Image (tube, coloured by chain):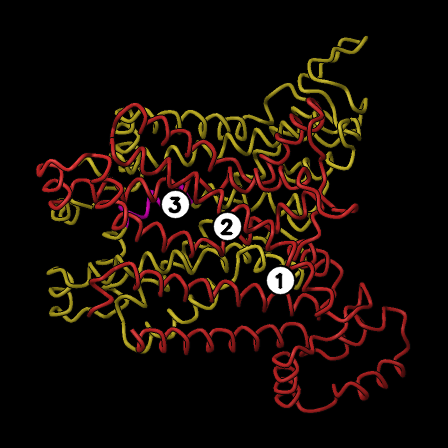
Chain colours: A red, B yellow
Amino acid sequence: MLAILLRRFVSMVLIMAVISFALFLIFESDKSSVAAKVLGQYSLPEQREIWLEKNGYNRPFAERYLSWVGNFLTGKWGQSIQFDQPVSELLLPRLANTGILGGFVFFITIGISLVLGVLSGISEASFKDRAITVFSVLTTSVPEFASATLLVAIFVFWLDWLPGTSPFTNGFELAELVLPVSVLVIYNFGYYTRMTRASMAEVMTSQYVRTAILKGIPFRSVVLKHALRNALIAPFTVMVLQLNYLLSGVIVVEVFFAYKGFGKLLYDSALFGDIYVVEACTMVAVFVAVLSQVISDIGYTLLNPRIRYS
Amino acid sequence: MTDKTADHATPPSGLSQFFKALGLLRESRIGMFGVILVGFWVIMAIIAPLLPLHPPNTPMVPLQGPFTTMEDGTNFWLGTDHKGRDILSRLIWGSQLVLLWSTLATIVAYAVGIMLGVAAGYLGGWWDEAISFFANVLLSFPVMVLYLIIITYLGSSGFNVIIAVTFATGPAIMRIVRGLVLDLRTRDYVAAAEVRGERPLYIMIVELLPNARGPLIVDVCLRLGYTAITIALLGYLGIGLPPPDPDWGKMIAEAQPLGSFGANGAIWPAIAISMLVLGLNMLADGLREISLRD
């Protein structure tokens, strides 16, 4: 167990290191373009040279990279060009907003897909199973920006029930959260449902479940006490691994609804050329993604006794 | 896949294989739905130049609703957008763009993914370590982040969209192929080829690749769907194919700031992309169903 953890941790650090180097190479290897971005297109060459010297850009590449890593680890993420604000001050509230959105989506999706997946998995090939499967294929095929368009057309323009954007200008409002959360749940629950269904259906045909049923244990408690725990191993791993894809969807939805989250910040900064914000956002996103892989591994180990005790 | 010996004895041509699969698909209802949906858009894309459509980029009367007939008898079946361009025409010409670029991007991503996957799986050792690590690094990015970085760094063009898609999906394809090859390389015919003294490159291309084909067909359908989404999505985000050609995602992006006036211009491309992706997903389901059956 400890060995697995250690190996995962080492590979996580290695991946982060490679990515940080690639990012630095992409965005900061050409120092004159950095100066042009920070000082603006119309700055004079002398100004740029002074700025480069003052900020240590005239040092050798390796030294610059190492000091960048050092600064990054100690939370000195630079100054946003677009917003003229320290990146860390800018990023943290945005991350909190995305956390709210992502948290709602994650738990609602898990709730719906576990119920539907188990319901269709315990009665394979029944009408209920087929209906749930078709429904989840249907919803998974509608990309986020398309379902957002359709939901906005229905609930905002036609019925006029909900606001069509979510900028939170008057503080937190639950109504503004409904559409973004719905869009992401609709797109994501189908995949989880099918995973849960497949896993549940497999466990239900196993020897020990048949034994339990033949022993006369009520079906309900066979499902809840015997089958569910084993059936959840595969979906759990997938769900946590899918955080990566969820994050991609979150970016799209935040842009669509003008939601002031991390994804919108990354999008705006990438288009603007706000390199320090892009670097920080990317590192945070990759960190979350890699961390979710480690968590999924640990969870898998904890849930599966065959691995836990080996 | 299950019928390996027969497969190896008489390698059928790709085309006849394709028609055989289509014939088998008739048994799967969900697969047939998929064929119809995808076929609809493929046919639309092919016959677009023959249809009596308004030119897709010419401004006429702005912001007409669906089923409008003007005084001079011109019809706008789905209405017009804010610049007065016919939505139906843009939708159908847009299908050409989405299908063309998503197919191209998928082919390139597959070529790269298969090459790396076969190399990693067959050569093993240091090759496998290096390729797998590289794939893991790329897979650690949320795909949208990867797209944003690549496209803002390289600039937006059709070619760069292909590069971005290759970076984002190549590693996943490589992993699948690697897994398949790890399984296949223990087969007798690989050992036989090794004994004959064939070079690794020959074994990879002639012996391993054709036999890894089966499970990949399902994945191709799914991935074509994802790529179609990606192309439209990049268009929506304004970092896809350059204007003014009609791109479904861009149509949504252009209509969105108009609020309720733009709703008509936005829902049609949203429905179109959903139809196409749904078709591809159902096709994949149908193919999976048949491949499990025999």
What residue sits 64% from the left and 78% below the top? A72
Q: Quadrant of residue A26?
A: bottom right
Q: Does residue A1 lie above or below B9 as drawn?
A: below
What type is the residue that disc 1 sits on? Ile
Q: In what element is the residue under mark 3?
A: helix
The residue tagged 2 is B105
Q: Disc 2 is attached to a residue of which chain?
A: B
Discs 1 and 3 share one subunit = yes
The label shown at residue B220 is 3
Q: In what element is the residue under mark 1?
A: helix
Given residues A42 and B196, the one toward you in this image is A42
Q: Does residue B3 lie above or below B50 as drawn?
A: below
Cα–Cα gap, marks 2 and 1: 18 Å
**Per the image, is B214 magenta?**
yes
The residue tagged 1 is B149
**Per the image, is B250 magenta?**
no
Give the residues in magenta: B213-222
Given residues B68 and B278, the one toward you in this image is B278
Image location (x, y in percent) of residue B196: 12, 68
